[in-house]
Every structure is written in structure tokens, then in C-alpha cells.
Amino acid sequence: MYRFKKYTALFLALLLAVSLFGCGAKPANSGHSYQEVYTRETAPLTADADGTFRILKINDTHFRNGVCENDEKTLAELKIILDNTPCDLIVMDGDLVEGTTSDKTYDKYQAAAKFAALIEAYEIPWTFAPGNNDGEKDGSNEDLIAYLLQYPHFLAGNTEGIRGAMQFFIDVESADGTLIHTVAILDSLSRKIKSVGPYDSIKENQIEWLLQGVNARKVPASVFFHMPTPTFEAAYKDGKAYEGFPFCDEYPVGDIQGNQLFDERTADNPYISLLSAGHVHSDNLAYLYNNRWYQLSSLGGYGAVGSDNHAPSCTLTVVHCLSSSTEAMYTFEKLSASDFAGL
């Protein structure tokens, strides 16, 4: 009897884990292995003749299946933005999909396919910096990235031995092939205990990888990751605001205290000119602080918590690569579908 009760309890616990975390679900098979990211080579992208390079950042769409009402509305509004916004690179900056959910219609890979099909139609290079929700259900960040590798314009990369699922540089050259800027994609990780623990933080070997890369290139670097660091809050309080970017501190800005190590190790680096994140679901922020821009983007989808208070939007970051001033190097614009009404 004791053995029966013991095994029954174990079976029920396993069923609970599957229902909560999707442990029994199999990742969709795209025919690609995550191991490919270690061998992917990213060709440099080219800025305009005047050194202008445009990055459209989308984050916190929190898709559930790609076909529910909120997801279809998000995709329709993203299409309006994409139709009207020339850009050279698209960064999906985390929380592409919802995390742990009891929604029986949840389909992570169908949602990813709907998003990818939309982006691919524009034949623009695009990439993905994992968010804290992306690997919480029905497969890990690595599984999701392996699925996205099937798309021809999807850029990916990583270095073996480095924590996180996505770390690589996208170099930007002038028309004559001179390196004038670099974009770093960094995984800010998820949670220490799957779905229930505190947020994890960027690790030392990731920071070393970043510093080695920017120091070797010796050009200004724009760094994209999902969860902000404590210095974002210091920038908001003490930095110089970018005109026209409203901010509402509905949610804490610097709540990932473990990312203080990142701030400490990168603070004096002369090449990192922009840190760009999402995650907060409030409104936009762009502040110049200690000769570096700290830029935070609002939520990008109707499935995200907080969409009742702030309409989903994207951020267009225009990098003026030939500028000798960090302050003048960037212009930021918040884009919502409503901005293009009547066009």
C-alpha cells in the first residue's frame, strides 16, 4: 500500500509539472539543430552612404498561438508599422511568446511561425534576443532558436562555453567596407528556477565575451538584450532625457539586481554607446547617462500584461554611425500603428 501511494504521488506530481510547465510537450521540428548557431557566420550589413543605419526593435509581443484575437491584432498592427518603416535590421528583443500559461490553445511554434512569416515577407535581416518568457513552456530558448533557423533572413550565433542561447555581433560597414559600428545581441537569461524563481542575471563569461568583442572592433557598439540593468534606473533619475520619449514608472526599471555585475564591468568601456532593453511593459525611455544611451521599449503586443494602459509599439533606432558624438549618434522614435492612420 505504501509503495502504491508513493508511486501515485509521484505520478500526480509529474502530471502537475507537465500541466504547469509544458515539460511533456515536444518542440516543433524545423529540420534544424540548435548546434548550428555555433557555426553560423553573419555577413556584415551596410549603412547608407551618409552612415545611417536603421534598427527596428520589437519586444514583448507575448504571442499565445498566432491566431487568437489578441495575436491577430498584434500582427496586423506590426504589418502597418513594417509597411511604413524602412529599416536595415529588425531585432525581436525578447518575450516573443507568452511564458507559463494554462491556456489550452497555447502553441508556441505556431505563434513563432506567424511572426516569422510576417517579418520574412520584407526580406530584411532579423534576429532574436531571448526574453525571460520564451523558454518557459514547450521547449527552451535553444529549441525556439532552432525552430527559427529555418528562415533565410534570420541571423543567429553563439560561442560555445558562454552562458545563454544567443550571443553574437552584427557588424555594420560603410559602402567601402570599413567597419563603422557593431550591434551585439545578448541573452539576459530567464529565471533561476524554471518559471517560479527570481529572475536570473547576465553572467560573467557573457560580459567578458561582450567586452572582448567590442574592444577588438574599436567602434561604437549598440547592445540589445531583454531585461534591463540597475543603471537604467539611474539613467532615468539622473540622465539627460531624449526629447519626445514619455516614461511612466508603472513597473520598476532596475529590478534585476543581479545585473549590477554587468553595470560594474561595462561602466568604463569607451565603445558601448547604447544599451537597449524591453521587459518592463510600461512606456518608452531613452536617457543619456555617462556618455551612453539607455533605451527601454514599451510592450509590443496585445497579449502582454499592461496593454490596457499602453498601446503596443515598436522602437525605431536610427544610428548615425559617422557621428563623433555619442549624444548625436542616435535618434529614437516610438512607433504605433495609429501613427500611420490615413496613409
Image (cartoon, rainbow, N blue to C red):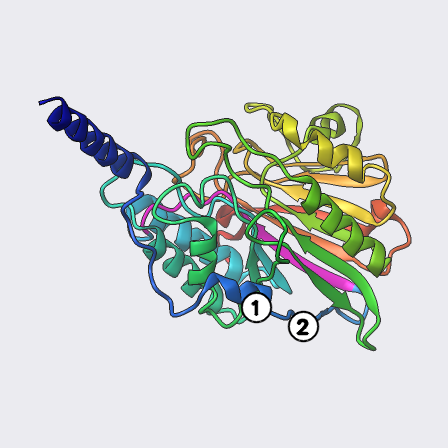
Please report the residue visible at 52 percent of the width from the left and 33 percent of the height from the top.
281
Q: In x, y percent, where is residue 312?
A: 48, 41
Q: Amino acid at mark 2?
A: Ala
Label 1 – label 2 distance at C-alpha:
13 Å
Q: In x, y percent, where is residue 64?
A: 34, 45
Q: In x, y percent, where is residue 292?
A: 81, 41
Outermost residue, left direction?
1
Instruction: Answer with the quarter of the image where residue 159 lies.
Output: bottom right
Residue 55 within the segment the image draws in magenta: yes
Residue 142 within the segment the image draws in magenta: no
- Between 233 and 50, the residue placed more toward the observer is 233
Magenta part of the chain = 52-65
Pointer 1 and pointer 2: residues touching (CB < 8 Å)?
Answer: no
- Between 3 and 225, the residue placed more toward the observer is 3
Residue where numbered disc 1 is placed: 124
- Between 330 and 277, the residue placed more toward the observer is 277
Please report the residue visible at 46 percent of the width from the left and 32 percent of the height from the top.
193
Q: Amino acid at mark 1?
A: Ile
SS assignment at label 2: loop
Please report the residue visible at 72 percent of the width from the left and 44 percent of the height from the top.
207
- Foreground mark, 1 or 2, reads 2
Labels 1 and 2: the sequence-earlier one: 2
In this picture, is 190 found above or below 210?
above
- The disc label shown at residue 221, or none: none
- The disc label shown at residue 43, or none: 2
Query: How dense is the environment of label 1, judged by Cα within 10 Å: few (below 14), some, or many (20 and up)?
Result: some
In this picture, is 19 found above or below 56?
above
In this picture, is 197 found above or below 157?
above
Q: In x, y percent, where is residue 208?
A: 75, 47
